[in-house]
Image (spheres, rainbow, N blue to C red):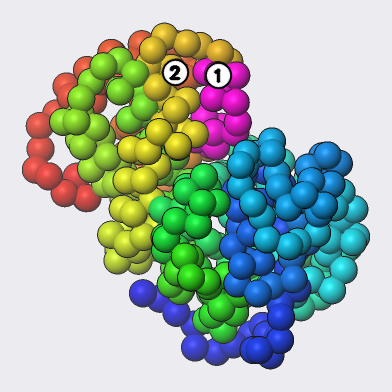
């Protein structure tokens, strides 16, 4: 895997508790704040909901997004200046399509040497940019200070402190190691990787594939169909990643196959759940309400397809999801269209 051997980022001394700010008090943001606190960090969780902030601080709970979960000691706040003051690690866990506007508002509050971590999994509509690219532009920071965390990390399971692993990707190896050390605890095992492009694309596109799997399941299709969509979905992710310069090894790892399987098969997956509702006959608007939370794939699928088209990469499953969600294509026709494609040899390049 690609790594950088020349540190370009000032990293705090080891052994000193890391002060971390987590931007976004939804389920994944709160869960990752818990991971950091359990790893010994001094954590401040920022969000716009005052009730959530109060509960996090006084009740060690977030009943709205993580019902029944006891949180470790951390500070919840709606004051971004309070959250970001002195923060050596800034974790961004806001919806991908509002990330640029949110970060621009907070840019002047971020410490000059802070390492920024993206938990977001999407491609920005209109620009087709990955979230690290959005962060670099919105916060005006070098890419060497921006890391990505991605893997088979379903928030409700991690909130129960069930063991899992993840990938921390950054172009600067020392920054990746700093983030990994900050979030490593008894149930959360980070691996480092220098392939930011590959890890980030895996996180964005697997949500789209999970929508396709959910649609198939909602129409009553079984394990053979699910396995086919997952496998060919991995081909699509790999095909786009390689075109954009990612490492092939990434796609067989935790951020690739690991996250894809978890997101496509778990009933806890928001994207799989939304896809199921679509497959059962709901409109997109009805499915969003029924799912009750953000399913990034529904918004990012169009920008992922735009990115693929721009680079001449064939992504038929992604195109099918876009057609179902935004062009009125019935799920059955999407499935038939995928199976009626010209016969050819199996392989990523085909």
Q: Is residue 60 visible?
A: yes
- Give left or right: position of 44 versus 186: right
Q: Residue at x 53, y 61 (%)?
A: 149
Q: Is residue 116 visible?
A: no
User: In the rendered picture of this protein, how many numbered marks are placed on residues?
Assistant: 2
Q: x%, y% of residue 119?
A: 59, 55
Which of 313 and 348 lies nearest the eye of the viewer?
A: 348
Q: Secondary structure at mark 1?
A: helix
Compared to residue 68, the image places residue 248 above or below, namely below
Instruction: State the mark number for residue 248.
Output: none
Compared to residue 190, the image places residue 251 above or below, namely above
Span highlighted in magenta in the image: 287-301
- Give left or right: position of 13 versus 280: right
Residue 151: image quadrant is: bottom left
Compared to residue 122, the image places residue 44 above or below, namely below
Q: Earlier in the sequence, mark 2 or mark 1?
A: 2
For the C terminus, give its image quadrant. top left
Q: Residue at x 66, y 89 (%)?
A: 15
Q: Residue at x 61, y 42 (%)?
A: 68
- Give left or right: position of 330 versus 273: left
Does the stretch in magenta take in 226? no
Residue annotated with mark 1? 290
Instruction: State the mark number for residue 277.
Output: 2
Which of 268 and 346 lies nearest the eye of the viewer?
A: 268
């Amino acid at each position: 895997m690609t790594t950088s051997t020349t540190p370009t980022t000032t990293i705090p001394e080891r052994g000193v508790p890391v002060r971390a700010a987590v931007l976004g008090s939804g389920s994944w943001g709160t869960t990752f704040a818990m991971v950091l606190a359990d790893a010994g960090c001094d954590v401040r969780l920022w969000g716009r909901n005052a009730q959530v902030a109060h509960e996090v601080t006084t009740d060690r709970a977030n009943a709205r997004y993580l019902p029944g979960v006891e949180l470790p000691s951390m500070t919840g706040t709606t004051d971004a200046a309070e959250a970001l003051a002195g923060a050596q690690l800034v974790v961004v866990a806001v919806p991908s399509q509002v990330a640029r506007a949110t970060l621009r508002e907070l840019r002047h509050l971020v410490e000059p040497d802070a390492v920024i971590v993206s938990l977001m999994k999407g491609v920005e509509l209109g620009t087709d940019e990955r979230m690290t690219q959005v962060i670099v532009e919105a916060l005006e920071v070098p890419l060497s200070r921006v890391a990505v965390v991605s893997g088979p990390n379903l928030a409700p399971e991690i909130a129960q402190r069930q063991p899992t692993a993840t990938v921390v990707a950054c172009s600067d190896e020392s920054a990746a190691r700093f983030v990994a050390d900050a979030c490593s605890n008894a149930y959360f095992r980070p691996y480092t990787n220098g392939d930011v492009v590959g890890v980030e694309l895996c996180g964005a596109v697997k949500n789209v594939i999970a929508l396709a799997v959910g649609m198939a399941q909602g129409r009553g299709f079984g394990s053979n169909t699910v396995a086919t969509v997952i496998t060919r979905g991995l081909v699509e992710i790999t095909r786009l990643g390689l075109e954009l310069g990612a490492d092939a090894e990434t796609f067989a790892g935790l951020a690739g196959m690991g996250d894809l399987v978890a997101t496509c098969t778990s009933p806890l997956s928001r994207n799989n759940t939304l896809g199921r509702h679509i497959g059962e006959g709901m409109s997109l608007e009805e499915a969003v309400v029924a799912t009750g939370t953000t399913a990034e794939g529904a918004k990012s699928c169009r920008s992922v397809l735009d990115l693929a088209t721009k680079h001449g990469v064939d992504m038929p499953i992604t195109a099918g999801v876009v057609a179902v969600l935004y062009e009125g294509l019935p799920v059955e026709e999407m499935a038939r269209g995928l199976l009626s494609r010209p016969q050819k040899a199996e392989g990523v390049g085909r």
